[in-house]
Amino acid sequence: MNHLQRVEADEESYRLARHAHLVVYTARDDGDLLTVYDCGAAQKPPSAQFIGHLVNVDAPASTERTPTGYIVRLEAGGRLVEQTDGEWVVRPA
């Protein structure tokens, strides 16, 4: 399931909505489960899920710890970029 729009110039980069939320579930043996929601208030299913590690967030965002990982709430959107196999970063739009 991946309904995110790719950034045209880069095949390993996806556009994130202005108020996107990334829910990171860290209790997996094969890497974290990254779940992307277009908006936390929209009550819609997730836009995408990835297995890997969110190693850095460069875009304006707030982070909240949860018992199973953390939530990253973007303030102005961004791009989800795969740096290497399974390592993801969030860059400004």
Image (cartoon, grey):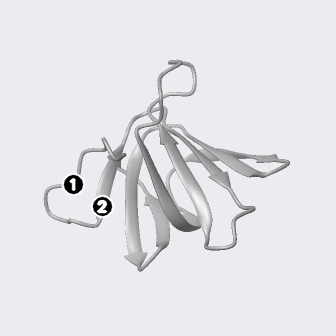
Q: Which mark is residue 40?
A: none
The x and y percentages for residue 71 are: 67, 45
In percent of the image, x 28 and y 67: which residue is there?
A: 12
Please state which amino acid type lies under the numbered disc 2.
Ser
Query: What is the crowding at mark 1: few (fewer than 14 residues within 10 Å), some, or many (at least 20)?
Result: some
What secondary structure is found at the residue carrying circle 1?
A: loop
State left or right for residue 22 relative to residue 13: right
State left or right for residue 85 relative to residue 51: left
- Return the residue at label 2: 13
The x and y percentages for residue 88 are: 48, 67
Residue closest to the eye, 63 or 71: 71
- Return the residue at label 1: 7
Tally the marks: 2
The x and y percentages for residue 44 are: 47, 22
Please state which amino acid type lies under the numbered disc 1.
Val
Kindly give the residue lying farthest to the left in the view shown. Answer: 8
In percent of the image, x 30 and y 61: which residue is there?
A: 13
Residue 57 drawn above or below residue 77: below
Residue closest to the eye, 77 or 70: 70
Q: Earlier in the sequence, mark 2 or mark 1?
A: 1
Kindly give the residue lying farthest to the top in the view shown. Answer: 42
Give the alpha-carbon distance from disc 2 to disc 1, as whole Å: 6 Å
